[in-house]
Image (cartoon, rainbow, N blue to C red):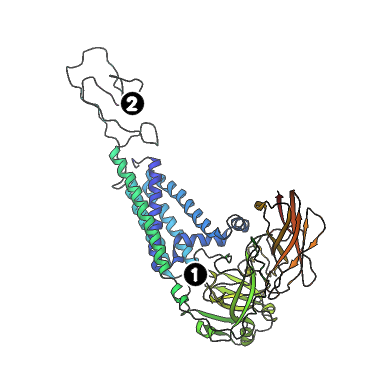
Amino acid sequence: MSSTTPRFAALGGVAAAAAAIGTAELVAALTGPRSSPLVAVGGLVVDTAPEPVKRFGIEVFGTNDKIALLVGTALLLGGFAALIGMLAARRLTVGLAGIVVFGGIGAAAALTRAGADAADVLPSLVGAAAGGAVLWAFVAGPLELDPWPWSPPTPAGPPPVTGPAVAAPDPDSVATSEGTGGTTSTGSPSVPGGPPVRESPLVPGGPGRRVDPDSRRRFLTGVGTVLGVAAVGGVAGRWLAGRQGVSAAREAITLPAPVSPAPPVPAGADLAQPGLASYVTSNRSFYRIDTALVVPQVDPATWQLRIHGRVRNPVTLSYADLLARPMVERYVTLACVSNEVGGDLIGNARWLGVPIRELLDEVAPLDGADQVVGRSVDGWTCGTPTAVLRDGRDALLAVGMNGEPLPVQHGFPVRMVVPGLYGYVSACKWITELELTSFADFDAYWVPRGWSAQGPVKTQSRIDTPRPRNRPAAGPVTVAGVAWAQHRGIDRVEVRVDEGPWQQAQLAPTISVDTWVQWSWQWQATPGEHTLQVRATDSTGETQTGEPRGVAPDGATGWHSVTLTVA
């Protein structure tokens, strides 16, 4: 059993875990960031977590859900590491076994990721070895705490007077008096006329357990040093992995001119109202929701798209092959199925790409191939109805976004864009495969997790201004927002105040039925608290339902409401 107390052993366990993670991140700079045990285990958590937990993460953290997951994983690992340290103080082999288990979990998680190979286990194994060495150093090696070397002092001066026997003072007792004689404040005896006695500090972990103060300083200095080196190693590993990314390759790409350019944005399509989302969403502001904890780095020089399955003429295309094909450019609004009523997981951009319909015509789908499965480089899948991809809408294999190559976080080098469908069934990023199959034969990633196999976008509307924090003054107030029903278009938007009669808003011009539309309504606001509501009607005559429902299994419903106080 180690002389290191449980509380200090817990610190040693945390330092060992930090050393393991920092070392693993450095090794992962060579084997690929997705082989990092923190990322691999986090990805496994994403794939296996119950659906309500995932929805909670998106609702609470939004597009920062991945950062929150990585931080939460690290904190959980820290808690287990502290427990391992305390167990190691009792029996070192138990603590080392815990390190081995964690290394095995990381290695196994790395091997389960799509495209993994044997080298992907190295970060977990090397990191576990480093963590085990640090744990040994703190609980049984050179940094182990030393017990306090107490011995009764030798009195100076004349021999003691013979008298009744007096019990020797207990070295672990607590002071009961001050001054000469008795005990010191730490329980060490003091003898009149003798040399001063060195105090022995109490260490948390049990009554009477003391360690040498020099040993304690050495231990704490070692913990701080290991944590600092681990942090530097982790940051350096991530930085080196980033240096191996594809940003330079992306910047070197010159996109071809489209044979069919996008129509110009009509005058007045963007009302430029403060607080209102712009008609075209910038690349930086465009929402990102996916399952990738680290953004895949796909080299366009080696990228290939395989179109296969239930087809007569399977084909494999390179990035150069794709760029050589005739390109079209279209504005398309994309929306996430996890977008709550009034949410911002939606954006409108100008996409450049190859029509998927033309590619499907060339491979000639067989009878019964009613589903096209898009497969990402990280193994994620979505299932899109074949009929939708061939019905004439501008479904694209996109290579450009708002006039530049796709941003890496938005699917570089190639992604799918399909008007009228939620992203989970159509917007495959970092795509490498299109497989023709059927809905009866294959369930894409989100279907076994409780989501519908097909996800047409629902008619929705949102109030962007005013918001509750605005507190407008009484008098004329511009109420404005956006509405969408991709591939059907918006025919009418209505607003009401305090459940009064619906008032028709004015629609701004729009490019096509595949994009959202801005709307505005002039309100003569009166002082007091008011509730505004909005609803939209699409071009088929279907009015947005007011029945509130959550995002699962195929998108939220209800009217967006804003309650505010007019000054």
Three-letter code for the amino acid on which mark 1 is drawn = Pro
| Image-quadrant location for residue 422 | bottom right
Which comes before the other along the chain, label 1 or label 2? 2
Q: Position of residue 482 (x, y in %)?
A: 69, 65
Residue at point 42% right, 48% down?
84
Marking on residue 490: none
Indicate whether 488 appears above or below 213. Answer: below
Which quarter shows the N terminus? top left
SS under mark 2: loop
Q: Quadrant of residue 518?
A: bottom right
Residue at screen point 36% across, 50% down? 135
Where residue 318 sits in the image (x, y, percent)? 51, 83
Q: Which mark is residue 296?
A: 1
The image quadrant that residue 551 belongs to is bottom right
> In the rendering, at what x and y percent does residue 242 appear?
43, 67
Asked whether 63 falls inside the magenta stretch, the response is no
Q: Is residue 181 left or right of residue 62?
A: left
* Residue 374: x %, y % from top left: 59, 75
Stretch of the chain drawn in magenta: 185-192
Residue 309 visible in the shown view: no
- Residue 370 or 176: which is nearer the viewer? 176
Look at the numbered discs 1 and 2 and tell me whether their residues touch, using CB distance below 8 Å: no
Q: Which residue is mark 2?
A: 185
